[in-house]
Image (cartoon, rainbow, N blue to C red):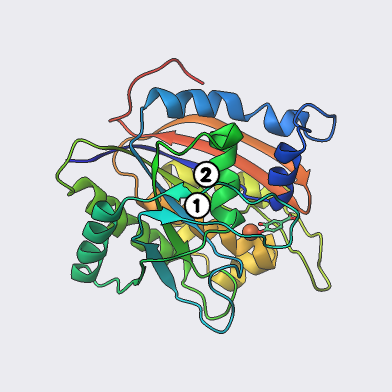
């Protein structure tokens, strides 16, 4: 059966992509942010993943407010990116994995998650920035990627508890897939931020650190929050924590937290990076 080696949660701020395009990683503003990533990459490569399942939110490139699936999955051989207006260069196509995608879809329907299936789908910075962070220079072509988009832009949005359960259903589907594939799950976005309105620029460091604490061994505590709690505590885009919860839901058993870092601010956001390894992970030295 396919094996989930662990989960990685990272912010997906577009400015990160622009900084990488311009080679600004070692400049004073960016250095400590980017310095957190090499140990996580090292762990990721050591797991020799065949497939990466990415929980992200589409900010309007594929799904605008006029058509917004609550949960959508890609089942395409390839995913294109396009200019979103953030100044990030378009990235080369991402390789898909249709067989596991369809297996997940069938399992989800069996377990009462009726997901939108996309056989064509453009992927935005919510997916492309984390992929570029993990494989700088866009060296991800050998990895098969399954994009899973969760509505985080238009009310009503799925609740934190529902996103966690959705992640659980996907984790179970992956673990029931006949094959030898190594899978790593990403959750992208967050942590606290608000991009517009009266509280534009709002960041809540204490709440972000609390979430990073709880998500390791007590994620259920976070699932008691409503989306309105999240908006109040973490800003209107703080609901992107839901992608972290879906990632966490997909992980099972005893977890080892191999990395945690938090950098504030990057653009308008409290930027978090966290790596949780399952007991199936290949053992490497503590990152
Ligand atoms: C920013 C953060 C996001 O999550 C996003 O999707 C776009 C912009 C920011 O902080 O600039
Ligand atoms: Fe975002």
Name the quadrant of the N terminus: top left
State which quadrant residue 196 falls in.
Answer: bottom right
Residue toward you, 243 or 63: 63
Residue 146, compared with residue 181, is above or below; it is below
Residue toward you, 9 or 45: 45
Residue 58, compared with residue 10, is above or below; it is below
User: Does residue 128 show up?
Assistant: yes
Q: How far is disc 2 from disc 1 in space, using C-alphas?
A: 6 Å
Name the residue rendered at 54%, 73% in the picture. 63
State which quadrant residue 155 falls in.
Answer: bottom right
Q: Which residue is mark 1?
A: 244
Q: Within 10 Å of the Cα at label 1, are there few (<14), some (14-19), or many (20+) other Cα atoms?
A: many
Q: Nearer the N terminus, badge 2 or badge 1?
A: 2
Q: Within 10 Å of the Cα at label 2, are there few (<14), some (14-19), or many (20+) other Cα atoms?
A: many
Name the residue rendered at 51%, 62% in the picture. 122
Number of callouts in the render? 2
Q: Is residue 57 left or right of residue 33?
A: left
Horizontal and vertical percent position of residue 211: 56, 49
User: What is the residue that sits farthest to the top in this orientation?
Assistant: 285
CB atoms at circles 2 and 1 under 8 Å apart? yes
Q: Which residue is mark 2?
A: 9
User: What is the residue that sits farthest to the bottom in this orientation?
Assistant: 66
């Amino acid at each position: 059966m396919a094996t989930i080696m662990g989960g990685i949660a990272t912010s997906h701020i577009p400015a990160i992509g622009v900084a990488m395009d311009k080679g600004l990683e070692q400049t004073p503003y960016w250095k400590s942010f980017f310095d957190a990533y090499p140990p996580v990459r090292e762990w990721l490569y050591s797991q020799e993943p065949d497939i990466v399942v990415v929980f992200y939110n589409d900010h309007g490139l594929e799904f605008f407010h006029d058509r917004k699936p609550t949960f959508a999955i890609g089942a395409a051989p390839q995913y294109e990116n396009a200019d979103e207006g953030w100044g990030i260069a378009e990235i080369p196509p991402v390789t898909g994995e249709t067989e596991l995608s369809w297996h997940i879809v069938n399992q989800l329907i069996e377990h009462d998650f009726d997901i939108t299936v996309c056989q064509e789908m453009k992927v935005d910075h919510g997916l492309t920035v984390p992929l570029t962070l993990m494989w700088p220079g866009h060296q991800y072509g050998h990895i098969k990627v399954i994009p899973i988009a969760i509505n985080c832009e238009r009310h009503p949005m799925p609740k934190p508890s529902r996103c966690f359960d959705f992640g659980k259903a996907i984790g179970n589907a992956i673990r029931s897939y006949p094959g030898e594939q190594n899978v790593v799950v990403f959750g992208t976005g967050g942590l606290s931020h608000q991009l517009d309105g009266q509280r534009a620029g709002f960041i809540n460091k204490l709440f972000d650190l609390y979430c990073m604490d709880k998500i390791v061994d007590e994620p259920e505590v976070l699932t008691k929050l409503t989306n309105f709690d999240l908006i109040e505590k973490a800003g209107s885009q703080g609901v992107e924590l839901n992608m972290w919860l879906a990632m966490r839901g997909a992980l099972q058993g005893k977890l080892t937290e191999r990395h945690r870092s938090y950098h504030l601010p990057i653009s308008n956001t409290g930027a978090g990076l966290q790596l949780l390894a399952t007991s199936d992970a290949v053992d490497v030295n503590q990152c």
